[in-house]
Amino acid sequence: MKKKSFTMVDVRHQRVLLIWAAAIVVYGVIFYYLPLAGWLMAFQDFKPVTGIFHSKFIGLDKFIRLFSDATFLRVIRNTLAMGVINLAVTFFMAILFAILLNEVASKGGKKVVQTISYLPHFLSWIIVTGILHDALSGTGIINQVLVNLNVIDQPINFFAHEQYFWPIVAFANVWKETGWNAIIYLAAITAIDPSLYEAASIDGAGRWQKIKNVTLPGIKPTIMILLLMNVGNVLNAGFEIQYLLGNGLVVNVSQTIDIYVLKWGISQGDYALGTAAGIFKSVVSIVLIVVCNHIAKKHGEERLF
Amino acid sequence: MEQTKTGFMNIALAPKAKEGKAEKTAVKKRKKISTGDLIFRICNGLFMLIFVIVTLYPVLNTLAVSLNDGTDALRGGIYLWPRMFTWKNYTTVLQKDNLITGATVTVARTIIGTVLALVTNAILAFIVSRKDFIFSKQLSLFWVITMYVNGGLIPTFLLYKSLGLTNSFAVYVIPGMISAFNMLVIRTYMKGIPDSLEESAQLDGAGYTTIFLKIISPLCKPVYATVALFVAVGQWNSWFDAMLYNRMSGDLTTLQYELMKLLSSVTNQSSSAEAMKNSNGSVTPTSVRAAATIVTMLPIICIYPFLQKYFVTGLTLGGVKE
């Protein structure tokens, strides 16, 4: 950039752009880059009174405390487990839904189903968890169906048992986002050259064969890109629903890194420990993104950056 | 990143040209339906039916409960239709001061937040999409980095506190105003606009401000609508900022946050049915919450079906979800 020649004429000509750009950069520095300076807190014996400039540096003490805390290790496990499970099931369902919806013959039916499928995406997690509480309560629809089908004798209190928590979270994610996530695959499917399907028909391919040999390869680049993006976000996937659905009985499996940060950092006021946990999450996420990007490059797929 | 964007752009634009052909194939297919095909169609239809039921049932059930007498609803057995019809839950909701305050704040933050976000993201996208702008690349990078690296909850919280943003309305609309994702969506769209339009305007002596307001922006209406929709939905649905930053200011509460408080109060006392009966005649926390839920989701449900083409465009332009 240094070598690229721009003259004072350019500067004068573009002064409106420059002024706006400067204002926007100032905004960005304050709201996006300044918080990064707060990472210093994790290496300090941080006290709000002395602030970030006058607190004593204590090295990696907070991180050592963090990783010797059995709760934090469990929290990492929970975050990873739910992140991976959610990613796997929402991914699979979105692709499945997109492919099957594309096979629906009636155009009107397709449109109606698709419109309905977007609906849950627009509802807040507050509403979704409220609905889940109703549906899974003792008198809720799920227990009623299960009892009537003789799968169980007594209604189950789903929110009181640890083994149900992860599946509930996964189901909620599928319910909320399948239609929305399918949008991009449907767009990719409509872009597949129809002559490929015609050729497959002439070769005597059935529906399944067409899906397997034409549709899936056609949307593979899209699948790969979205997979990469989501793998990088796997640790970011756990806050709202776990916070809203979690309770004392399932705390061992419901707490995620973000909740841990909130609990220690804000509620208990240990800013340094909370920040340390946050840094751990950020660093792992960035490493994941870089690794995924590298893998994509190696395999000649489209990259994120 | 660049590659991705154009890739998705092609995907978004391609179908139009091919629709004609696709219809022809559909006609051909209809002539001969084999048994396998028939079974597939039936199974697929069933799958779609189940999908629709699972998606819609909880919402319709909440609607039925909200229109049913509260005490009666505790007996269970209400599915898609209220058993003892009443408006009482809704009149109760509309009389709750905290819900009214929450609704007012939510409407205000949705409108103000959306306008601010749209204007600033549009300006930023305009700047970085100017090919001759000397810092175009650096400015893009500056924002793309923010997509991947951020300070995290605690530093952000302390920063807002020291900036005096806690216990203020500004915390809802200022911090998240410019986002790299929304900027990229608009930028991708702007890059698709032919340069010749801008060049001819420049020959006529138009400055950047004029070009932005009179030439680029009118053409960007679809993508502006997309971003406005994304921002507005986010504003409408957010509750965490109200809880974290404005917990102490009752007059700055939001609808979703009040709904959350209703939810936790219901789950805490769900066992004590007696307490519910006494609360307000035939109205129970559960039935009031159902009514509040419907009121909260109603605006979005009414609007989103008509904006479908916009968010489909937005997703394909951004190539990223959410």
Image: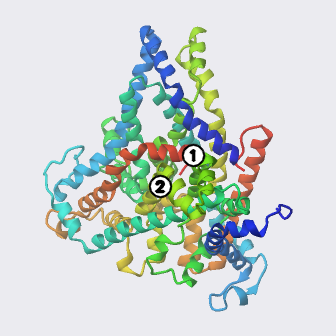
Q: Are marks 2 and 1 on the same chain?
A: yes
Real-space Cα distance between discs 2 and 1? 13 Å
* Mark 2 residue type: Phe
Q: Position of residue B179 (x, y in %)?
A: 57, 62
Letter of the chain that mark 2 sits on in the rendering: B
Question: Which residue in the structure is indicated by mark 1?
Answer: B317
Residue B166 visible in image? yes
Instruction: Specify whether B237 is left or right of B296.
Output: right
In the shown orientation, is residue A144 left or right of residue A250?
left
Q: Please tell me whether residue A104 is drawn above or below residue A120 in the rendered image.
A: above
**Which amino acid type is marked by label 1?**
Leu
Q: Is residue B269 left or right of residue A206?
A: left
Name the residue nearer the viewer: B283 or A105. A105
Q: Residue furthest front?
A: B204
Say which of B174 and A51 sits in front.
B174
Chain designation of label 1: B
- Around disc 1, counting alpha carbons within 10 Å, would you say few (fewer than 14), some (14 to 19), or many (20 or more)? many
Q: Residue at x 39, y 25 (%)?
A: B45
Disc number for residue B230 = 2
Q: Residues within 10 Å of mark 2 (few under 14, many from 20)?
A: some
